[in-house]
Amino acid sequence: MARANRAMVRDYADDLKLFRSPAKRIALVALLVAYLGLPLVLDDFWAGVLTLAGITAVGALGLNLLTGYTGQASLGTAFFIGLGAFTASYLGRASVLGGKGMPFIVYLVVAAVLGGLVGFVVGLPALRLRGNYLVIVTVGLVFIGLYIFTKWKTVTGGPAGTSMPVKVDILGNNFGSLPAGGTVLGRDQGLFYVVWAIVAITALLVKNIVRTRPGRALQAVRDRDVAAEVIGVSLFRYKVGAFVISSAIASVAGVLFGLHIQNLSPDPLVIGLFLSVQYLAIIIVGGVGTVYGSILGALLIGGTPAIIDRVSENVPFLTSSATGSGINKNVFAQLLYGVLIIVFLVLEPRGLAGMWQRAKAYFQSWPFSH
Amino acid sequence: MTKFLQLASQGVALGAVYALVALGFVVIYRATGVINFAQGGLVLLGAFLVYNATFTWGLSFWPAVLVTMIMGAAIGALFEAIVLRRMIGRPVYAIILATVGLLIIINEIVTTIWKTPAAAIDSPWGLDKITVGDVKVNQVDIATVIVAGLLVGTFFLVFRYTKVGVAMRATALDQEAALAQGISVRRMFALSWAIAGSVAVMAGVMLGSNAGPGIGLSATIGLVALKAFPAMVLGGLDSPGGAIVGGLIIGLTQILTGGYQPEYVKFLGDSFSDVMPYFVMLIVLLIRPYGLFGSREVRRV
């Protein structure tokens, strides 16, 4: 029997399919082609922008699991980014493990485990605190974290910071300078492959959590935790569990973030509260409680300043100097960021994902309006 | 003993600043249940608007403060009317993010307009010190304590004895019941933002007419609001008296830690006092999740 509408879900097996329609399968192939091809054609600037967007997408996926699906608001992401980055820098350093430094996979996994453990401790107060109070505790975490990062000089290098491992070795391939068809790719292009592969893995992980039993438990906790507990959802297990997984993912994003920026210091402007805010902005602009929304949000929030940076020479009122007349381009990017957040919150609460779904619904049900 | 008194007086002064900022938080939280992350931005904007009014428009100090307080109130009420009113009923983090958006916008506007400000606002109290016994006290610090005390006193009287104050308390207690009694909840929301806006201007004036690291007329004074978080949480999010007590406790703890910790518990590092407020806050929250004077949230199943 022909199906009336491919988007229609008729049984549980339909609901579980990741790529339900042929269009989605075509999109998957297109994404794969883009993944393999983009680093070969992008210049350093855009490869860097897309790599950083991928890194924030990883962290945003983790935060979306915690905030979007479980309803536990956190502004502590920056702390876990720092934790992951400093762990990687310490373990990858030549002075560790007999003068060679540990390979990428090892410090990635160690950082994730460490992030998860600290996430467990941070998740415990969430059992007692709600809403605004929890947000403020995570704000405190960022400041305490910055202090520890500044003071623990043997690991973090103190205020001057430390450098990240230059080589990014995976199975004998150095993604820091990857040979490709006669030429050698730059560091940003090589990291692009690593980062977006991890984005795909994280997205699959989060998707698998949220579309199965634990995911339904998390959403029950979000919608009303007391009611969830009454129907048998262990608040301890799912609230703290969401913190553990989300923190581990943020820590992985931190490793990648460190590798991307290379010189890492406990600077409040780099891994401070505004980094946490950025992650929260990404999941809201992208779409709370959707997996692809986190990725779209990361691309939009990461891409906008880059576009402004590139077109600023052709826009009369933008300058690149800090003191002259006109608006500094970085200031303008920040202003636009602030306005963007408020506009999305007021006019499109479901974010880019909501816009996409509305557009899709329009074309699927065309010529009928709903 | 002299050292202790000296530190204690500094602590009380710092606490008064925190209390002033926390008071703005509390007014908004009481009525609307929103933590206003933009409070620091309003403080910053207030300081620079007063500077602008005295320096560029040539107003004398008190008229400038009055004009700016009206502007601060207008900005607060406008933001509530345009943005937050459309977000009632949305999750906590969404509303917080909206106020962060306002904070970012204010920060960028201030740093773009006032690129090279003077060191401090010209004020009647100036930057002189007076000596009491062996203790040196900044005049601006005394003024800050007096202003904070006066504001809290006014708040207490207004909330307790005026019709508007009672209406605001009713709104904070139960919005639907307040509506049923003929109170315009919208107006109360806008009013609380307006009050917070003008309190922020007052905090900005006290910070901007001071001098020292992190205070004075610079773009960093907005960050004081982040330090006032612990003060607000410590006192309880919805208690004006708690804001004052919390501010004083945090201010005293921070300064006393800075004075004695390098001597006695050296291993914690040389600027431990900067993060001490957050530790105090964490400990208090783990023991009393609703702060010292905050009202316990009743949850229906």
Image (tube, coloured by chain):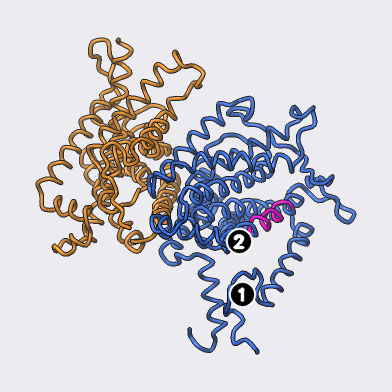
Chain colours: A blue, B orange
Q: Which residue is mark 2?
A: A207
Q: Which residues are magenta?
A: A194-203
Q: Nearer the viewer, residue A196 or A290?
A: A290
Crowding at dot 2, Cα within 10 Å, few <14 / some 14-19 / many 20+, comes out as: some
Q: Amino acid at mark 1?
A: Asp
Magenta-drawn stretch contains A200:
yes
Q: Are marks 2 and 1 on the same chain?
A: yes
Q: Which residue is the extreme one toward the right?
A: A182
Q: Nearer the viewer, residue A19 or B26?
A: A19
Crowding at dot 1, Cα within 10 Å, few <14 / some 14-19 / many 20+, comes out as: few
In the figure, residue A232 lies in which quadrant?
bottom left
Q: Position of residue B63 (x, y in %)?
A: 21, 42
Circle 2: element type: helix
Q: Amino acid at mark 2?
A: Lys
Q: Residue at x 32, y 61 (%)?
A: B85
**Dot 2: chain letter:** A
Q: Which residue is mark 1?
A: A14
Q: Residue at x 79, y 28 (%)?
A: A99
The quadrant the N terminus of chain A occupies is: bottom right
Compared with residue A3, is residue B61 higher up or lower down, i.e. above or below? above
Q: From where the camera sits, is residue B194 visible?
A: yes
**Dot 1: chain letter:** A
